[in-house]
Amino acid sequence: MNVLGIETSCDECAAGVVRDGVVLSSVVASQIPVHAPYQGVVPEIASRTHTEWIYGVVSGALQEAGLGPGDVEGVAVTAHPGLLGSLLVGLHFAKAFAWARDIPFIAVDHLLAHLYASRLSLPARGDGPGGETPDYPFLGLLVSGGHTVICRADDFDDVTVLGTTIDDAAGEAFDKVSKFYGFGYPGGAAIDTLARRGDPGTFRFPLPHLYKPPRAGPDHRYDVSYSGLKTAVVNQLERFRVKPSAPGMEAADIAASFQKTAVEILLRALLRAVEDTGLRTIVAGGGVAANSYLRARLAGYAAGKAGAGPRVIFPPLELCGDNGAMVAGLGERCLSRGDRSPMDTGASARVQAFKRRYP
């Protein structure tokens, strides 16, 4: 079936069409230029911009797919988590579209959609549905500006959270460090680019220690924390310097050393989960899954096990960030099973399981 997916959880106004697991279109209107002067997303500006752009974005997605409104057989939309005002724009547009066409409507979870992105096929890749898709169960690594989650996925809608961030998300830490040093916006892409020229051994930043035995509090074996790293990079930089930077390379060395530590924090928790669960497939998703160092480290870990390492699957780069195709793909699975959402479905800014308190 032709399913239209709408994504407005943060600052990307996106829509896409999926049929039988194949992406027919994916249109993303980025608000980066709108928020760049503020070096961060301004929620009120984001929701207003979604209101102005969403009609054109959806029309563009249908045109790219070669479809008209009457060819759409179902509508999926992100309902949580995200910025509440932004979510409501997409949710109400999707409801109106479905009601006007008298077609099924489904509200989906943003993070489950990111996890589903690796199951979609892009025509340019030349593979069909199921050609390179992971088998369940697998370990999921969801990393973005708002969330960092390690989970076990037993099906597309059966996910158990094993670990989360207890403070800043990975992408949030990238943005804050980049903003402080003026590396650029958005921070994740700016640091990734700058770090390629730097020496990651210039600074040795500390790794957080969260795990406590059950008698001393909750089990945080798979949780991560980024507030300490952020503080070290921003406020205690010279304390962790182990060698001088070459002339003109200070910024690149800071970016490279920070990025290395940020990724190691993720991998330490993730590899604990691999060891404890015995699952041999890791599926990544979210905007930070586009980070070149993270992709290289995970690929190197898998290859370094002489064929015995876990299989690591990343979505195509164009499906790592927020997009409508992943929403449409997840929605297609739900709709094909007969799931429907009522027209009084609301939006929710948070999902409690995706972040926990410490200790």
Image (spheres, rainbow, N blue to C red):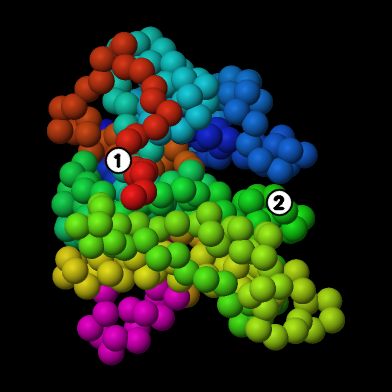
- How packed mark 2 is, by other alpha carbons closer than 10 Å (few <14, some 14-19, many 20 or more), is some
Closest to the observer, 135 or 185: 185
- Secondary structure under badge 2? helix
Q: In the rendered view, would you say 194 is above or below 198?
A: above
Q: Is residue 161 left or right of residue 69?
A: left
Callout 1 environment at 10 Å: few (<14), some (14 to 19), or many (20+)? few
Q: Does residue 299 belong to the magenta stretch?
A: yes
Q: Is residue 240 above or below residue 124?
A: below
Quadrant in the picture for the N terminus:
top left
Magenta-highlighted residues: 297-318
350 to 92, vertically: above or below: below
Whether residue 134 appears in this view of the structure is no
Q: Which residue is mark 2?
A: 179
| First along the sequence among labels 2 and 1 | 2
Q: Amino acid at mark 2?
A: Lys
Q: Is residue 51 left or right of residue 122?
A: right
Q: Tell me residue 36's x, y (percent).
A: 73, 42
Residue 97 lies in the magenta stretch: no
- The residue identified by callout 1 is 353
Residue 146 percent location from the top left of the image: 48, 44
